[in-house]
Amino acid sequence: MSDVLVVGAGAVGLLVARELLGSGVKVSLLERQSPCREASWAGGGIVSPLYPWRYKPAVTALALWSQDFYPQLADQLHAQTGIDPEVTRTGLYWLDLPNEERALAWAQLHGREMHCVSADAVRQQVPALGRSYQRALWMPSVANVRNPRLGKALQAALAADASFTLQEQCPIQRLEVQGGKFRGVHTAQGFIAADTVVLCAGAWTAELLKPLGLTLPVEPVKGQMLLYKKPAGWLKSMVLADGRYAIPRRDGHIVFGSTLEYEGFDKTPTAEANQSLQASVAELLPELAQEQPVAHWAGLRPSSPDGVPFIGPVPGVEGLWLNCGHFRNGLVMAPASCRLLADLLLGREPIVDPAPYDPRTRLLAL
């Protein structure tokens, strides 16, 4: 039996495993399909909430810690595996915001560089910008991570550790709890005994807790994305307007998103979303709209109240822990949320105040 069983091999589950292995803990990771093929693969990878000043301090605390840590994480993974997660500091322009003062005050409070600039100044950096925009806020420090490569790098790093095991295509049928203590999981491949488990199953986590009489307010929210291909350097910075954004990759691919749809666990890409996204492309980057998208996909975000994840022990079940419910900011908050989970599980001084994330005060009995 491993010291800790982790359920869910998205970015959060992989980073939890990495944190625990780094402290000498043996880890077994279970994934119902293949690693990093759900929200962690489908997201855009902006290493910032879309509008960070609109979130609660609990989200800000994890997001800022992760932003500062991501370049170091990428360098470590690249050196260890040869796979570069491509954490690229492109900066981000917010176009024609209705309340710039609030954003600027937030940036000043948290010591983050942010400037008001004219649309003409934006066009010097982004010549293809649509003509309707008048002004922007510019944060030069914002980076993006190429999330599929991050997943591959994490998998390769973990696979090299003799204290780590991964079981793919291993859906959990139910959790085994006896006398208020976690005992293991029943899977399609048989029973796996464990005294400690961390549930990192994203939008599916609530389904695992229901048989225990616990209501976790985490549900799937579909997001659809388009992918374009231009020459490398065609778009040098990220741009965002009215909730839609374009993210340049180093090789010239441009990720454009996204929708926000409450459709249960249906993640089928739709023609309606495709048309809506392409209309936004035409407004934001008209020249790009002359191209046909090279890909269109959908993923399921794990929504939670106010976007604040659940991190910590489950009340009434010894050995059962959560790290889930990151909503639209899973990649943004993942490094910090996983460090915090490891701190709590191992009895270390936590990197941030854990109270806002504590399942013991946020879960409801059925």
Image (cartoon, helix red, strand yellow):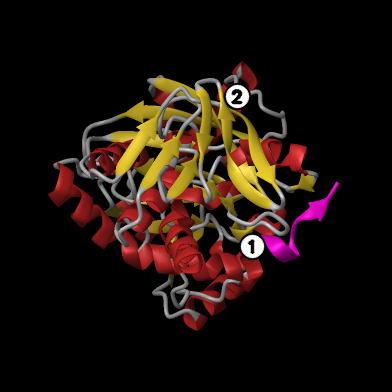
Front residue (pair 198, 251)? 198
- Residue at (63%, 41%) from the top-left corner? 205
Front residue (pair 176, 63)? 176
Q: How many marks?
A: 2
Residue 101 location (% of width, % of height): 59, 75
- Residue at (28%, 43%) from the top-left corner? 158
**Horizontal arrangement in the rendering, residue 263 relative to residue 93 (left or right):** right
Q: Secondary structure at mark 2?
A: loop
Tag 1: Cα neighbours inside 10 Å, few (<14), some, or many (≥20)?
A: few
Whether residue 315 is visible to the viewer of this picture, yes or no, is yes
Q: Nearer the viewer, mark 1 or mark 2?
A: 2
Please state which amino acid type lies under the numbered disc 1: Pro
**Horizontal arrangement in the rendering, residue 83 relative to residue 344 (left or right):** left
Eyeballing the image, is 187 above or below 99? above
Residue stretch in magenta: 358-366
Residue at which label 1 appears = 98
Whether residue 130 is visible to the viewer of this picture, yes or no, is no
Eyeballing the image, is 317 above or below 200? below
Query: Is residue 364 part of the magenta span, yes or no?
Result: yes
- Residue at (49%, 61%) from the top-left corner? 341
